[in-house]
Image (cartoon, helix red, strand yellow):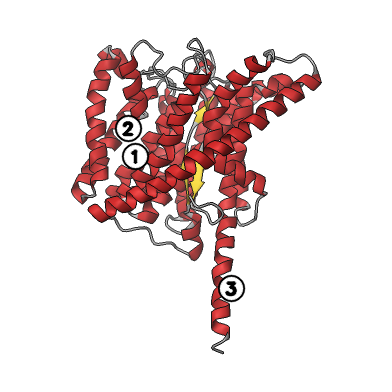
Amino acid sequence: MKQHIPLLARRKTTAAPAAAGARLGWLDALRGFAALVVALHHFDVLRMLPFGGPVRQNFDLGVFGVMLFFIVSGYIIPASLERRGDVRAFWIGRIFRIYPALVVALAASIVMLPAGDGSTSLLRTGDDLASLVANGLMLQDLLGVRNGMNVTWTLCYEMVFYFLVTALFTRGLHRHSGVIAAAFAGAALAIGTALAPQLLLTQLGSVRLLLLIVTPVFLLGFWGVLSGNRKATGAGALLLGGLGLVLLALNSRAVTFETLLIPATMFAGTAVHRVQHGRLRRAPALLACGFVVAAGVLAGWLYNRDGVQTYTWTWGWKAFSLSYLAAWALFGLGFLLRNRRFPKVLTWLGAISFSLYLLHFPLLRTLGPLLGVPPMPSSTLGKFAWTGIFLAVLLAASHVMYRLVELPAQRLGRRVQRAAERRRPSAAYAPAAPAAPAAAAAAGPDVILVPRQPDGTGRGPAAVRARGERNSASR
């Protein structure tokens, strides 16, 4: 009997990581697929297809990818914070997961693209100080400053979500994600387009003045959440949460219903996670999620017309509403298949998706002129060849950046966390107790978000970066 016990223990040990990998695979697959869809959306793949015109009028690939990423991010980001119970560790992890890859991508974009290319605007706006500060805070799209890269506007909404999640967590209100999601969705539905975008800039009349107000609040709040002191952490989280809520409600560049649907969608994803792990009552939470989905579809039908669709970069209400509904449908399908193993190519795409999102537009703008490719190849063979070349270069470059930038930065982040803990132990909050062994494994990935269709002023498709500490890749 004694000889059999170690063998059984070894079997359990080896089986657990495989099961965890299977549980995380569906999130990898969703974000990998969404990242590829976003890249093809900017590539304008629908123009190359004979049926692309009718599809584009009724379905927007950018909105679909954006909202899918937001759902995934909402599903797992709060779980990451609650699993640790350590606000400082959460934020150090966020910093090292986002900023290094973003800085490298911005530098590469500035080097590759000429000054006249509006897709890269950092240090090219005529006000370099405002550009650096706003993009450094990752709030530029809510401060009236052009995005450093056109695709990075979505990171602003991800950052605000982090603010809100942290504030709710430190006050013990994070368990009410269903109610919060429904409240944001209700506000989106009720307000619609009644509020004009960027109200604060209209009143203050100066981007620099707004930056002078926001920057000290941001830095003070950030000092609090990184301090390790419980009272300072709570105060800092409240400052950041309040700042994010004000900017989101009053100074977004997007129309109000779209802006408020973003946090509604993310908190609905959180509610799904809570129901799955028995931390939220099923019926109220599912009603809240159903209301969010219905509000997203209905808001598109009510408001995304009569010229407003030019602000959402869609062809009309059908393109917005159907894409939003489809994002939820695909997430639901992935959720139903969450215990199955997914093809390695999809999980690999999920791993490199943040790099893919950051690099796809500058590579597209660089490769075309370099190879002498016209905006629309005339022959079918030329279209296939150009698509293949673009995807091959993009996937290779994204893999290289993931291996050489993202993974080392994440390892450095973990070392910084440990050093901060040795120097001054953090006053950790009570971590969430999993309802079942599966919950702890399923809470593994963290997600970085990013959305939609670009123009020269900075709006671009979403590509969320969900990342996890998986057994297949030490992250």
What is the secondary structure assignment of the residue under circle 1? Answer: helix
Closer to the observer: label 2 or label 3? Answer: 3
| Closest to the observer, 18 or 178 | 18
Residue 243 visible, this angle: yes
* Residue 349: mark in rendering: none
Q: Amino acid at mark 1?
A: Leu
Residue sitting at the far bottom: 1
Give the mark nearer the N terminus: 2 vs 3.
Answer: 3
- The vertical placement of 387 against 443, above or below, is above
- Compared with 81, 300 (above or below) is above
Asked if labels 3 and 2 touch by Cβ distance under 8 angstroms, the answer is no
First in sequence, mark 2 or 1: give its number.
Answer: 1
Is label 1 or label 3 in front? 3
Question: What residue is pinned by disc 2?
Answer: 245
Q: Quadrant of residue 393?
A: top right
Question: In what element is the residue under mark 3?
Answer: helix
The amino acid sitting under disc 3 is: Arg
Q: Are marks 2 and 1 in contact (CB under 8 Å)?
A: yes
Residue at the spot 39% in from the left edge and 62% down from the top edge: 433
Q: Amino acid at mark 2?
A: Leu
**Local secondary structure at mark 2:** helix
* 65 over 446 or under it: above or below: above
- Residue 258 appears in the figure: no
Question: Is 195 situated left or right of 231 in this image?
Answer: right
Residue 206 pos. (x, y %): 28, 13
Q: Nearer the viewer, residue 187 or 375?
A: 375
Quarter of the image where one finds residue 37: top right
Rendered image: mark on residue 164? 1
Q: How many marks?
A: 3
Q: Is residue 313 left or right of residue 153?
A: right
Q: Which residue in the structure is indicated by mark 3?
A: 11
Note whether 5 is above or below 49 in the view shown: below
